[in-house]
Image: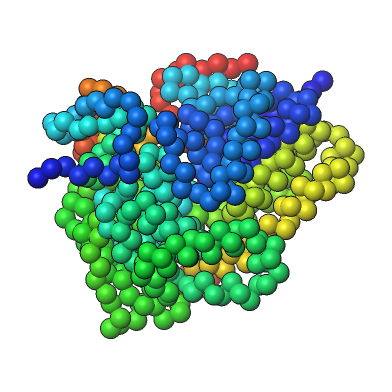
Amino acid sequence: MPLHVVIVGAGPAGMAAAIEARRRGSKVTLLDEMARSGGQIFRQSAIDSELRVGLPSELKRKADLLSGFNAISDQIDYRANHTAYALFEGPELHVSDDNCSEVLKPDVVIIATGVCERAVPFPGWTLPGVVNVGGAQTLLKSQGVKIGERVVIAGSGALPIAVAAQLSKAGVHVVAVAMLYPMRSLLVHPYALWAGRRVVLEGFSYLNVLRQHDILMLSRYVPLRADGSDHVESVQIAQHDGTGRPVPGTEKRVGCDILALNYGFTVNSELAAMAGVDMTYRPEQGGWIPITDQFCRTSCSGVLVAGDSGGLRGAWVAQAEGRIAGAVASRYYDERAVSNLSQEMSQSFKERSRHQSFQKAMQQFLQLPTGVWGWADEETVVCRCECVTQKQIQTAIDNGHTSLNAIKRNTRAGMGWCGGRMCMQNVAAQVSVGKPSEDLQPMTPRPVARPISLQAIRNQTIP
Amino acid sequence: MNAPDRRIRKKTGDSFLFEFEGRSITAWPGETVAAALIASGHYNLRTAEDQSNRGLFCGIGMCWECRCVVDGNPNTRACMTEVKPGMIVRRQHGVG
């Protein structure tokens, strides 16, 4: 009997998993929140004339994966516009669209839900016009709309540089790019640079674009505050002392209509946590990470995790890992067949570890120094959904509520529409200042993991 | 003052109008509510419970900061909702 494999997420990992599991004869269901497959990195535009802002190599990889997926998409149960909002032991997966919900009881679930962006709170960061860097990129790539006329970018890692270059090429005036660390610190990892040479070359070509457009690149700069009445009009930035603390006297005020931020990522791991998967806290990889073995298996029977939702690892790793997870899922209950896969799919395993070594080197940029947690003042909102300020959270901590669950119960931080995705890591940082954080437990994820309509719950199908 | 147009090139298909806070806004097929509003310079989509103004933040449907009232339905994400001719979009105040 072929196994029923349900995959959550149609990005590089989920699509690759679907192709592989289908190829191996499994009955495949693929759920995705978006109207079109591709996830964030391979997002397909709803506009006829898609803007091709990526590099040729990236565009080819996207086209290859999408055509591979399109070739099998009518052989699987592919459900666009579907949300997976709960996962329990079994595995038992609860899914919904706008009007109906359904309980699925497959043999195996592959979680391939990716990441979302992370920003660090500071005064003014909730003003309209302060956005995530990836949000600005999505608007450009899939909608053909410039997010603003004068854009300041602040962040760390590779994405701010890529997006600064893409915006400049599209005719946006990128006023300044304020990076947390100098990029040259990558040079101490020559092997990793070689392993990730394709990505490194992409990076160089973006830096080249920034040079051609004469963009002001500032290393070791941080945002102090964003100001404006109903919309950001200027930002104040300053040099930091190496630990993220602004150095007095180095402040600059820059006029802009957009401030785009990226200080790393938050993995969408709440389904794994809800199912009881063993997790570990790794902020530089995206927060609470499900622990997996080399075959993408978790501590929970029938639950696999592939791609960025298992810790930030990039699209190349995600695609290789998706293939592995799809194959493992198809043979999940045959231990010998699974262990043979490391031989049979040695190419995918090799590709995954090669790109992973590059990603490890990149993670140094997403290791935020402790001083960044001093950017917020007492009145700064930390939990955007529930309008919970830094002071309210600090008061709860001072009153002895030092677990994230206790802070959530006492302040409502993390209880809003985003499900804690935007604030939980920042609350965790505030709790764990000066303390080791590996043992820090996340707020207990409960259904529903993502907002769904009451109507969808009323119209529920249970097998 | 003319509204800005932040589309990077001419779009295919026929444009149409929808309404935001009583103003007529031009949009093209396939655009999201957020894209059409930002293209014409509107960023402020909501006031939160603490009276602060909010707009698009993550841009990919995760943060729900851009939730507004679309055709009478509150808590509708501007970044995930395709704009349609004649749609009536309003800022959401508080819980909507």
Determine the image quadrant of residue A15. Answer: top right
Q: Residue A142 in the image: state x and y as whole percent.
A: 42, 39
Tell me what residue is drawn at x 46 percent, y 48 percent: A53
Q: Is residue A331 left or right of residue A322?
A: right
Position of residue B83 measured from the top left corner of the image (x, y, whole percent):
31, 28
**What percent of the width, then of the height, locates residue A46?**
42, 31
Report the number of discs.
0
**Residue at (13%, 43%) from the top-left corner?**
B2
Image position of A127 (left or right of A431): left
Residue found farthest to the left: B1
Q: Nearer the viewer, residue A459 or A57?
A: A57
Q: Is residue A373 visible?
A: no
Pick the quarter of the image with the C terminus of chain A.
Answer: top right
Closer to the camera in the image, A24 or A428: A24
Quadrant of the drawing holding the N terminus of chain A? top right
| Residue A418 x %, y % | 41, 43
Residue in the foreground of this view, choosing between A110 and A398: A110
Q: Which colour style is shown?
A: rainbow
- Can residue A368 be seen by looking at this rendering? yes
Q: Residue furthest bottom?
A: A249
Q: Residue at x 48, y 19 (%)?
A: A100
Q: Residue at x 67, y 20 (%)?
A: A75
